[in-house]
Amino acid sequence: MFELVFTSLVIGGLMLALLGYYISRLGLSTIAFSAAHAALAGAAISSILNRDPYTLPAIFTLCLGLVLGVVLPKTSIEVLNNLSMMLFSLFNSIALIAIYLGNVFVLSTTRVGGLLWGSPLAITMDRFIYITILTGVFITYLMLYKSKLDAIVFDKKLAEAEGINVQFYSIVIITFMCIALVLMLEVIGGFLVFSLIYVPYIVSVMMTSRADLQVIIAGLFGAITAPSGAFLSLILDTPIGSTIALTISLSAITIYIVKKIVVHFRSLRENHS
Amino acid sequence: MGSPRIELKNVYVTYQDIERPALRKVNLQVGESRLVVITGPNGSGKTTLLETCLGLLKPFRGVVKLLDIPTTSRRIYVARRLCSYLPQNFMRSPYESYTIKQVIAMSLLSIKGSPSTLTLEDLYRIKNIAKLLGIDNLLNEPIGKLSGGQQQRVFLARALVREPLVLFLDEPFSSIDPESREHITLLINEYTRERNATTLIVSHIINKELSRVADAVVTMSNGELVDIVGNLY
């Protein structure tokens, strides 16, 4: 069981971090944020209705992701961010109302607990296989289309002018993200899954200024911190999702402080010489 | 003579929520091996015209064709792959992490199939164009660390390395020092003639060399073409 959980988190952490790197660099972070909460609302409703954990969250998050993906080229990034944040509030409230209306006692069940703060029990062999397949497909996609994604990341308008269908590639990335969120939601929890998307990107930018290394660092950071957090939660007997998010955040803060100290001492040494 | 590379027929373009069209009654045909300068005061519609030619802005009236493909067609991506664009707002943040070599290579790789890797010939082409523009010693530097003038040269190298049929350059001399403008003008002219390319340059500044090598100068005002001097086609 533990091997399955840790392996799933290594693969899932890698997948969310790689996706997060491109999501963040494409300026789609707020879409990811609202998509995570759309998946949460879908999962809350499906748990109350006692349905499977994939269909409704997938419908909710994919509909939201694809609608925003279609709106994307027709509007400014500010309007898109505002729209995403409004939808985030909407889906959050739907999720909490669904849980409340279902049954108060249901809050103590593993399924609803998993929705809110994550559960290792959500990792079944089925889910492990889905996570592995999705990660494999995404990495293959990256290898095939990295040059086009890089061109879009560097400058969307220029990429469009040079003949790259920016909307198509953005929608593909959003679709990958939505499916990844559905698969990882009940493992890490609806409120915290976003930390595995955004924080690895921040860390990669802090650690190097080279774009080709940033994507590797983000992926490695996700693949290492997600299972480390799960291991800590096992030792400390704390909820898995919160402990993973805590491990990710504390690691990022530590890297930030260490980098500041290194830069400080390096400049001191340069001043002396 | 073949069909024009760029064709606009009675084109009107407007921006969202703005009543007054940014382009009005624009008729233009530009053929191959032509270097055309578009000039005019701020807000006259020069950049809008370039973006309309590329299909980045769609007309609400009239027809725009690039390499014989209407810009409203899905096939416009095919035409764009045969074109290059140097945008007016090219400056990158100091944190931009792509190296100059990567930035130039992106435009080459994006027109290839997938997966795409640089061949030795591509690398030679990148080095050669970088040398011509005086940025060959900076190829491994992140673009964010460069000055405005150096960044503009990188974008010009990126545009030329694709060996496009149509070259759209929006204020390509805005950050270039006066001494280098002449050299870059000659480089663009040489490319246009040797490759039978079509080059549209939007420029406030028409330096002596530019006015000498241009086949036509188009003047814009309030979204209209008010004067055309020279041969467009």
Image: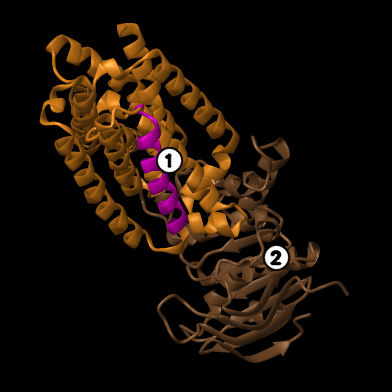
Chain colours: A orange, B brown
Instruction: State whether residue A77 is above or below residue A8.
Output: below
Q: Position of residue A70 (x, y in %)?
A: 47, 55
Image side of residue A26 versus residue B61, left or right: left
Amino acid under disc 2: Val
User: What chain does badge 2 belong to?
Assistant: B
Per the rendering, the mark at residue B166 is 2
Instruction: State whether residue B112 is above or below residue B58.
Output: above
Image side of residue A103 versus residue A23, left or right: left
Q: Main secondary structure of the magenta part?
A: helix
Image point 36% across, 42% down: which residue?
A: A60
The residue stretch that appears in magenta: A52-72
Q: Is residue A2 magenta?
A: no
Image point 24% across, 29% down: which residue?
A: A115
Image point 13% across, 13% down: which residue?
A: A237
Foreground residue among A263 and B42: B42
User: Counting other residues with Cα less than 10 Å from the Cα at mark 1, is it few (<14), some (14-19), or many (20 or more)?
Assistant: many
Image point 19% across, 11% down: which residue?
A: A234
Q: Position of residue B139 (x, y in %)?
A: 54, 44
CA distance separating discs 1 and 2: 31 Å
Amino acid under disc 1: Tyr
Q: Is residue B4 in view from this perspective? A: yes
Q: Position of residue A49 (x, y in %)?
A: 28, 32
Foreground residue among A5 and A127: A127
Per the rendering, the mark at residue A22 is 1
Foreground residue among A199 and A103: A103
Q: Quadrant of the C terminus of chain B?
A: bottom right
User: Counting other residues with Cα less than 10 Å from the Cα at mark 2, is it few (<14), some (14-19), or many (20 or more)?
Assistant: many
Q: Which mark's residue is nearer the viewer, 1 or 2?
A: 1
Per the rendering, the mark at residue A252 is none
